[in-house]
Amino acid sequence: MPRGCCIKNCIQSYGCSNSDLNTRLGDSDNSLDDLYASAIDRLAIGIAEEAAPSHGLSQEILRSAKLPETVEWLKRVRRKIHERPELAYQEFETSALIRRELDEMGIKYRWPLAETGVVASIGTGGPPFVALRADMDALPIQEEIEWAHKSKNPGKMHACGHDAHTTMLLGAAKILQERQPLLQGTAVLIFQPAEEAGAGAKRMIKDGALENVEAIFGMHLSYRHPTGAVLSKPGPLTAGSGFFKAVITGKGGHAASPELAIDPIVAASASIVSLQHLISRETNPLESQVVTVATVNGGGAYNVIPNSVTISGTFRAFSNESFYRSKQRIEEIIVGQSLVQRCAATVEFLEKEYPFIPPTVNDQNMHDHVWKVAADLVGAHNLKIATPHMATEDFAFYTEAIPGAFFFIGMKNETCGSVQATHTSLFTIDENVLPLGAAMHAAIAERYLKEGKSRSSQFSVAGTSISQ
């Protein structure tokens, strides 16, 4: 469906007349972006209005999260975790802190899963079961911000906000435990290791983290959007990714006599150029994919043709079909171009060291549930349609297994310096986001249990879509 038609249908569903639409849209494509933004606003307003019956529940939860003693506790917990960052599958202190907090709350949990993971349960102990997930691991980065709670582990830093993710889920645990008599099922809280490396989600699933669970939700902080904004979208949100390494072997020789050698550098060069055609000539222009050669290693002297060259890189796509087609073609292209240059090539996809991460695909109904809760908590004007991006998120393993939704919460705040990109030494967060994240988690779980997964979204616009 053309973009303008999709927008028209959506706005009409929320009370905008044909004459108004035609006046505003006119004959110019330049007004599509403005109208698209209006469609988002109207859709969000409609969601907020139709979610009104549960508005009181969400606000109760938000008030609990914003109690001064709760906010101070959230800050203390986050700062303790921030001071002791730990890399993938080494989150022993973080895991111990989580278990101590759960013990103090009187919450039962299973441990260890995937080395350091913790899975807690709150509620009736019976169905339905809904899961909330937070990641625990840090990055191998030296923190450069000087403050009282700077990382005390040299060369390690919470530079992606996982300390906050873990804290917000503990905050949700605290709120849900206080509201346990109101829960109409069981909330499962998954504290997961190794999101940054090692596909921790996959191992958590293997160890039983999703036992009996029928839906799952996860969140990530966003430094690009102001504190209080909530972003998501149905369908593909983050890309699937894999890595490859190719060794191209020829015959070394003197650079002055190339005819006596078989030059693997020429073969590698031809392979790299041809891999770019995989996107520009073989991929649907309406699909987003990436193939990047990131390393080239071969030779050590100006006058020597080397015996071999090694190239490596990454490939990414928003569907499994596109991902595995790229995988097949990467190998065919490198092997084929090497043969043309009289070389041999072997291609590895390093699945043992770097398991393939599938695309994160949000279920429509689960996304609608997040949208509905967020509209109550932050207001319809703070709901934003997320732009899909090529970064990966191993939450994708959960959404492959069961319906789920992943979303972002803004925490950009120039006043406290929360403007730096993730995975950098200057990254910091606006701690005002902590109670909001805790409330989002708790409200998503409690309302899911109350409303039931099987119920169709009450605010979906039947037969329409919004195209970006």
Image (cartoon, rainbow, N blue to C red):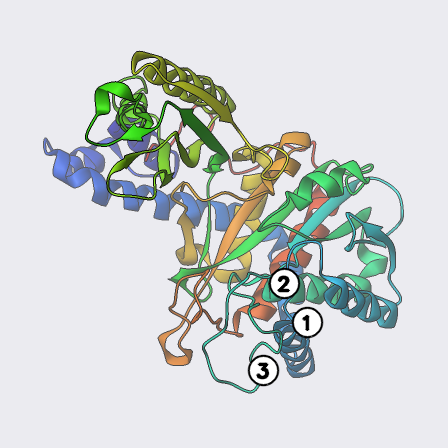
The quadrant where residue 258 appears: top left
Label 2 secondary element: helix
Residue holding disc 2: 439
User: Mark 2 or mark 3, which is nearer to you?
Assistant: 3
Mark 2 and mark 3: Cα distance apart in space: 25 Å
Q: Earlier in the sequence, mark 2 or mark 1?
A: 1
User: Mark 1 or mark 3, which is nearer to you?
Assistant: 3
* Image quadrant where one finds the C terminus: top left
Label 3 secondary element: loop
Residue found at the far bottom of this picture? 148
Residue found at the far left of this picture? 27
Residue holding disc 3: 149
Query: From what the image shows, is residue 194 above or below residue 65?
Result: above
Label 1 crowding class (10 Å Cα cut-off): few <14, some 14-19, many 20+? Answer: many
* Identity of the residue drawn at 34% across and 32% down: 467
Amino acid tagged 1: Ser
Left or right of 176 in this view: 220: left
Residue holding disc 1: 64
- Tag 2 and tag 1, C-beta contact below 8 Å: yes
Q: Residue 337: x, y in percent?
A: 32, 17
Amino acid tagged 3: His
Q: Residue 403: x, y in percent?
A: 64, 33
